Amino acid sequence: MSENEDLAVDGKSASPASQTVRALLGLRELILGGELSAGERISELWVVERLGVSRTPVRAGLIRLQEEGLLEPIPSGGFAVRSFSETEIRDSIEMRGTLEGLAARLAAERGITHSMFRNLHDCIDEIDHLLVGELTEESFSGYVDANARFHRLLAAAADSSVVERQIEKVATLPFASANAFAVVQSLDPRARETLVVAQAQHRAVLEAIENREGTRAEALMREHSKIAHQNLKRVLENQRAMTKLIGGNLIRRNVR
C-alpha cells in the first residue's frame, strides 16, 4: 500500500497533522488505559490496524511518547512501554515544583500585567466557589479544570517562554502534572480538606506575586507541590485508587 493510500485507512481521508494527533492520543490511551503493559514491545503494524492510521503518523506518535517518557527504545529496534518507579515519579513531581517555583519568583520580581492578575484572581475565586459546601462529582470535576488553568496561568505569568515551555514539558511526564492524582483525591474522605489547603496556597502565592515577594512566592509554590507527593503515597497505599488511576499499571513500588 502506498503512503497516499495509507492516509485513507478505513476509507477516511485526513490531513497528516490530524492523523499524527490521532495516533498520539490513541497510543497514549492504549498505554495509560492498560491495553499495553509495561515492558511490552509495540508493533507499528498492530497500532496501524488498531487505530486506523498510517505508519508515518504512528512513527511520529511513538517518537513523541518516547520524548514524554512513556516509551523507551529497545536494542532490537522499535519501542517498549516503560514502567515507573516511585522514586522516578517523586523526582518528576519535584522537578515540576522547582520549575513552578521559579515561575512564581520571576512573576513576582518582574511584575505581572493587570490582565494576568485578574485572570489568576478570577481562577482562584472560581475554586473558592467550587469548594463551598459538600464536594460533589460535578464540583470536583470543576476544581480539576480550574486547578489546571491556575497552573497554566502561573507558568505564563513568568513572562518567559523558556520557563513556560519547560513547565509544559515536565507536566507531560507520567504522573507529574498538577492533576495527575486527582482520582485519589476523589476517593479520599479527606479530599475537601486537602483541596482547601491547596487553595490557601494558591491565594498565598498570588499575594506574594502581587507584593513582589519573589523568594516567598517561590517557596510557597515548591511547598504546594508536596501535595502531589502526599497523593502519590496515598494512591500507593490504596488498591482501589491504584486500579482507577490512569496509568496506575505502569507504577512499580520501590524495593525496600
Image (cartoon, helix red, strand yellow):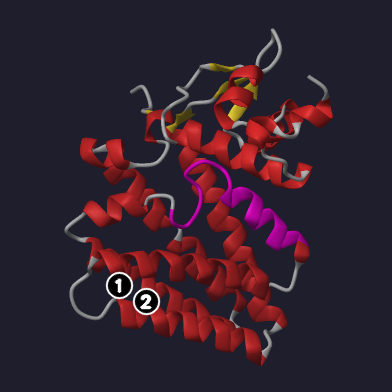
Residue 30, x across and y down, in percent: 49, 32
Which region is colored magenta?
162-179
Label 2 neighbour load within 10 Å: few <14, some 14-19, many 20+: few
Q: Which numbered circle lies on residue 106? A: none
Q: Residue furthest top?
A: 76
In this rendering, position of residue 150 left or right of residue 49: left
**Residue 78 higher or lower than 162, as above or below:** above
**At x 77% / y 42%, what residue is drawn?**
16
Circles 1 and 2 in contact, beta carbons < 8 Å: yes
**At x 63% / y 35%, what residue is drawn?**
65
Residue 246, x across and y down, in percent: 40, 41
Callout 2 secondary element: helix
Could you tell me if residue 176 is visible in this image? yes
In this rendering, position of residue 150 left or right of residue 76: left
Q: CA distance from mark 1 to mark 2?
A: 6 Å
128 magenta-colored: no
What residue is shown with label 2?
200
Residue 28, x across and y down, in percent: 54, 37
The amino acid type, in three-letter code, at marker 2 is Ala
In this rendering, position of residue 166 left or right of residue 85: right
Callout 1 secondary element: helix
What residue is shown with label 1?
196
**Residue 130 higher or lower than 99, as above or below:** below
**At x 42% / y 36%, what residue is drawn?**
247
**At x 22% / y 35%, what residue is drawn?**
239
In this rendering, position of residue 165 left or right of residue 139: right
Label 1 neighbour load within 10 Å: few <14, some 14-19, many 20+: some
